[in-house]
Image: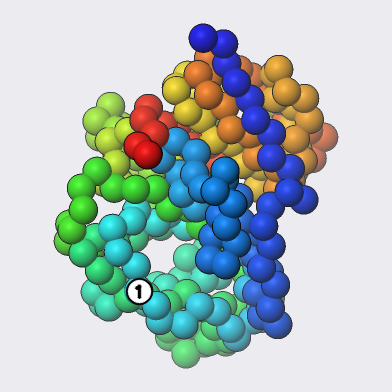
Amino acid sequence: MATGIDIRTAGERFRTRTDWLESHHSFSFSRHFDPGNTHFGLLLVSNDDVVAPGTGFDTHPHRDMEIVTWVLEGGLVHQDSEGHNGVIHPGLAQRMSAGRGILHSEKNDAWTLTGEPEHRDPVRFVQMWVLPDEAGIDPGYEQLDITDELARGGWTTLASGMPRDAAHRAISIRQKNAALHVTRARPGETLEIATAPFVHLFVARGSLELEGAGALAEGDAARVTRAEGQRITAGPAGAEVLMWEMTAAIRP
């Protein structure tokens, strides 16, 4: 069967706006529901969030979900009921396994955990959720700075549960059929996307050309079925791109 490419532009996304949050949702989320847009492959959530200084998401629960957070600008303070805490910044990958249940908060706090003033600007981050292989696992947390790997160019594996990636320097997720890659492509740089049944591309910054589909701007996404290594070429300002490679999909 031929490759299928479904482009979803930034302006098509669901939008949540409050006095402290600007959020764009690639899939149905919270009060936004479209039965025809609930997931792609194993990916259920891809939220592009901007949080004002001194505000954020108060403590709330999650269960049976692998949650990966990638910060684009600023610093995001994480705290959870398992005792994990820290400040996530650009280049630092983070994964939280909700498992049988976890409580956590995410804040663009005006003070760091050490009491030093910081985060006076908005924080922008992309948060993505995939289903785990198994329900009811122990909650977990992992973070890893991949700044040096990103600087070498090409794709960097950010998070993976695929057995082939066990030796890679990446955070792990409890989903053997999914891996997340990121690139900060230089202007004009050309890369191949993964060859996989399901590939989700999200343009976090900049712009690119996707072979067989045309131009994608910041905030645009491509849902590629039966991907065969199509090429992307970064635009004149380069492109920061998040790519989910998935070998399975959620069963109805």
Mark 1: which amino acid?
A: Pro
Secondary structure type for disc 1:
strand
**Residue at 65% in and 39% down:** 221
For the C terminus, the image quarter is: top left
Q: Which residue is mark 1?
A: 61
Residue 39 visible to the viewer? yes
Residue 94 location, quadrant: bottom left
Q: Residue furthest top?
A: 1
Task: Locate residue 9, reporting x and y percent.
Answer: 74, 43
Residue 27 visible to the viewer? no
Mark count: 1
Question: Which of the two residues, 32 or 204, is positioned nearer the viewer here?
Answer: 32
**Residue at 66% in and 68% down:** 16
Task: Locate residue 46, reporting x and y percent.
Answer: 54, 52
205, above or below 89, in the image: above
Task: Locate residue 160, reporting x and y percent.
Answer: 35, 39
**Residue at 53% in and 19% down:** 227
Residue 207 location, quadrant: top right
75, above or below 71, in the image: below
Left or right: 63 with respect to 53? left
**Residue at 65% in and 74% down:** 21
Left or right: 107 with respect to 136? right
Left or right: 11 with respect to 230? right
Q: Residue furthest bottom?
A: 115
Query: Would you call the spot at circle 1 few (<14 residues within 10 Å), some (14-19), or many (20 or more)?
Result: few
Task: Locate residue 143, reporting x and y percent.
Answer: 36, 57
Residue 68 location, quadrant: bottom left
37, above or below 56, in the image: above
Question: Which of the two residues, 90 or 101, is positioned nearer the viewer here?
Answer: 101
Colour scheme: rainbow
